[in-house]
Image: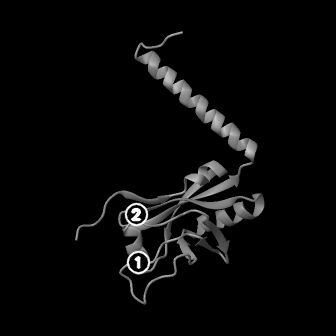
Amino acid sequence: MAKEVGQKVIASNRRARHDYTIIDTYEAGVALVGTEVKSLRAGKASLADSFATVDDGEVFLRGLHIPEYSHGTWTNHEPRRTRKLLLHRKEIEKLIGKTKESGLSLVPLSLYFRDGKVKVELALAKGRKAHDKRQAIAKRDAQREMARAMGRAAKGKYRR
């Protein structure tokens, strides 16, 4: 069988970019059992309500829902079990310092296959207040409108 090459997104947490201000991102491997990988290859996973914690010098992903494998037997996994994330020691120490000192959160942004291995994009994030969310939406809408106007002007269809 040929080796997989490239990146295939399994699930993404679009809500995280709305609820949090992303400060830094990390790529981490995920320690999984066989039936979890088979279920992910079928494209089934949910990052809703998932988060990462640092316990005893290790990073764990909690709340990630990977449904049971349909053809699995008694060896099937528990859908919402805690999964260990694989990061370098220096990255873990940096995350410990940031989460303890400044009250930042670890939020998973996406789950994907990279060259056949399951990876998670983990973000160091700060929660947004309601007024911050409104400002971000207004800024994004203004940028979108400017891009549209520039496109119309480039095509010569700009009218005053």
Residue highlighted by disc 2: 113
- Tell me if residue 103 comes above or below residue 160 in the rendering: below
Q: Residues within 10 Å of mark 2 (few under 14, many from 20)?
A: many
Tell me if residue 124 can be seen. yes
Q: Earlier in the sequence, mark 2 or mark 1?
A: 1
Q: How is the image coloured?
A: one colour
4 relative position to 102: left or right? left
User: Which one is closest to the eye, mark 2 or mark 1?
Assistant: 1
Q: Secondary structure at mark 2?
A: strand
Quadrant of the drawing holding the C terminus: top right
Q: Of the residues shown, which amino acid type is indicated by label 1?
A: Tyr
Q: Residue at x 76, y 57 (%)?
A: 102
Disc ID at residue 69: 1
Q: Of the residues shown, which amino acid type is indicated by label 2?
A: Phe
Quadrant of the drawing holding the N terminus: bottom left
From the top left corner, tell me how far across and down residue 119 is, in percent. Answer: 46, 65
From the top left corner, tell me how far across and down residue 100 is, in percent. Answer: 75, 64
In three-dimensional space, the C-alpha distance between marks 2 and 1, rounded to whole angstroms, equals 17 Å
Question: 2 or 92: which is nearer to us?
Answer: 2
Q: Residue at x 66, y 71 (%)?
A: 54
Question: 106 or 144: which is nearer to us?
Answer: 144
Q: Residue furthest bottom?
A: 74
From the top left corner, tell me how far across and down residue 61 is, in percent. Answer: 58, 70
Tell me if residue 21 can be seen. no
- Tell me if residue 114 comes above or below residue 148 in the rendering: below
124 relative position to 72: left or right? right
From the top left corner, tell me how far across and down residue 9 is, in percent. Answer: 42, 58
Question: 133 or 4: which is nearer to us?
Answer: 133
Q: Secondary structure at mark 1?
A: loop
Q: Residue at x 47, y 77 (%)?
A: 32
Q: Residues within 10 Å of mark 1 (few under 14, many from 20)?
A: many
